[in-house]
Image (spheres, rainbow, N blue to C red):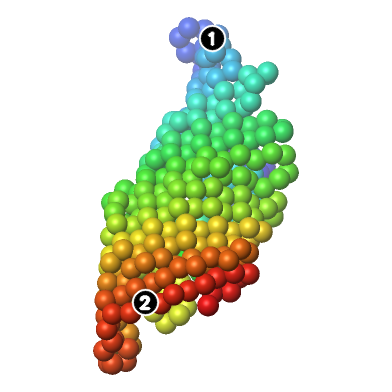
Amino acid sequence: YRDLHWRCPLRRIPDAGWECAGDLRSGRSPPMRLTVRFDEATTQASLTQGGALFALDRNAATPDLTTLDLTRVPMAWAQALLAQAWPGTTLKGGVLDAALAIEAPANRPLRISGPLRLRGVGLETTDATIAGENLGGDLRIDYRTTPAMSLLALDGALRGGEFLAGNTYVALPATPVGLRIDAAKQGDAGWSLPGVEWRDGDALQASGRLSFTRDGGLDLLAIDVGSRDMSPLRQRYLSGWMGLFGLGDVDLHGAMDLHVETQGGALSRIDALLHGVDLRDPARRFVFDGLAGDLRYSASTPVRSELRWRGGQLYGLAFGEARLPMASADGLLR
């Protein structure tokens, strides 16, 4: 909103206070209803449009504290806030409910904390490398910032929706997926995430750390991933990558443990342990039964590993039990 116009009848209220309520207009945009109410001890303001409510409350007894209550607020209202932390990202839809406490003492960091509820959120970056649709979740945020450093803690659960990050397409299940992010940013440097957790039942458990460059590119990643039931992985997490290799319909069953590291945005290490994995291609190009063992990749020092399987098929030709020893060094896998 720019070039705002607000006209309201000013009237007395009890306790030596005043109230003024009227339409807030900007050009041809639909009007909002702005109400301001104050007395010697408190200041309250609310902005409403349709079913959306944005309410502010301050008390002279706690001058450093402001509370914000948001009910069915369109995510587009938060576009300016998002631009501060994630430039080049546009919110395309969804609603937000929140109860936030904003602490702004003179000698301590600005702090914003409280619960958030997201429903039907859509977003997209300018270069279209990241996009999300119909995302939802119940989260708790704790954000602290000074000119020198910003700290963010986000904890809760995501529910439904889908998003794309590069070639990684994720379709979230209807069941809650636990999420925790601890992040820090110093000055103009990129964000560092020393603690990240993702909890999707038996399908996927992940924890690790990441850091990003100043322009938002991935600089470092070290993450541990475990799956006790791989059958949902293709539909929820792997369809984008498997589709690149023509494996979009391959069924996965079994369990795995995985450790992945990148440095400078390049893959540096993979340690994968497979436990009784079955791979079945509906087109019958290949079948692997009882795939087990380890697969190790290194961009530097030599490492060895070995895969084993009970049997399978290759274009209809059956084969029996086998071992496949491997060696890796300097970014090569032999």
What label does residue 163 carry, if any? none
What number is the disc on residue 61?
1
Q: Alpha-carbon neighbours of circle 2 within 10 Å: few (<14), some, or many (≥20)? A: few
Residue 60: image location, x then y, percent: 56, 11
Residue 124 seen in render: no
Q: Is residue 95 above or below residue 45?
A: below
Inter-mark Cα distance, 1 to 2: 73 Å
Query: Mark 2: which secondary structure?
Result: strand
Nearer to us of marks 1 and 2 is: 2
Note whether 174 is above or below 1 in the view shown: below
- The image quadrant where one finds the N terminus is top right
Crowding around mark 1 (Cα neighbors within 10 Å: few <14, some 14 to 19, many 20+) is: few
Report if the CB atoms under discs 1 and 2 are less than 8 Å apart: no
Q: Position of residue 198 (x, y in %)?
A: 41, 49
Q: Which residue is mark 2?
A: 323
Tell me if 288 is positioned left or right of 43 in this view. left
Q: Amino acid at mark 1?
A: Ala
